[in-house]
Amino acid sequence: MATATVHAANINFHADRRVARWRPLVQWLLAVPHLVVANALSSLRGILTLISLATVVFTKRIPRPLFDAIAMTYRYEWRAFSYALALHEEYPPFEFMPAADDDGHARNTSLTITYPEQLNRWKPLYKWLLAVPHYVVLVALAVASVGCLLWGAATVIVTGAYPERARRFLVNAYRYCLRVETYVGLLTDEYPPFHLGE
């Protein structure tokens, strides 16, 4: 009996496929305030990653408060994106603390990143190079995701339900991107797998 592999970064997504037919037309607009915040947090993440580079090289660790702040930016970003893409109907909270994932919104989606007790001090110097093959895959996934998103939105408008395969692909593509970003962003030494599964 095969056991599931536990990865350092993961997304759990469980939401009703039924989505109001009007939502794909305007939900992205309702998400604009969240997307603005997510963009600002992405810039903050870049600064925090530079700080964590120094801490990893000198101490082989990321201080827990620094790690938690970076992980928060990813959690917020995923909540904003999953809503903007009309993958579910529940409006995400304007909340930065992990408790935001413990409320009702967690029924739909949650993003977790496991804290590493110790990291290789030299890997930050060459991780970006090892990730080059993943960048090629990410470009292909981005192109495919646009098509999948259009198909999903059109299907919701016509049928009132998000096609399961399209939604699963979008979630898996984001999960793949998350694992690459957390590897290159120094949150884990676990090399990302070349597959879209959990």
Image (cartoon, rainbow, N blue to C red):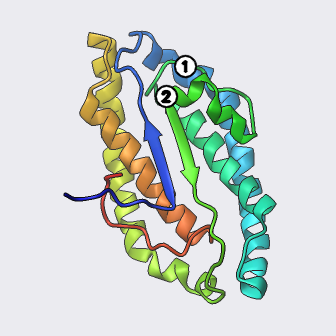
Q: Is residue 19 visible?
A: yes
N-terminal of the pair, mark 1 or mark 2, is 1
Please tell me which residue lies in front, 140 or 9. 9
Asked if labels 2 and 1 touch by Cβ distance under 8 angstroms, the answer is yes
Tally of marks: 2
* Furthest residue in direction left, as rendered: 1
* Furthest residue in direction bottom, as rendered: 122
Q: CA distance from mark 1 to mark 2?
A: 8 Å
Which residue sits at x=62%, y=86%?
125
| Amino acid type for the residue under numbered disc 1 | Glu
Looking at the image, residue 29 sits to the left or right of residue 145; the answer is: right
Q: Position of residue 70 (x, y in %)?
A: 70, 56
Q: Position of residue 80 (x, y in %)?
A: 60, 34
Q: 13 above or below 57?
A: above
* Circle 1: element type: loop
Q: Position of residue 114 (x, y in %)?
A: 58, 59
Q: Which residue is mark 2?
A: 108
Q: Position of residue 142 (x, y in %)?
A: 39, 51
Which residue sits at x=77%, y=84%?
59
Q: Is residue 84 visible?
A: no
| Amino acid type for the residue under numbered disc 2 | Asn
Looking at the image, residue 126 sits to the left or right of residue 25; the answer is: right
Which residue sits at x=54%, y=69%?
183
Q: Which residue is mark 1?
A: 90
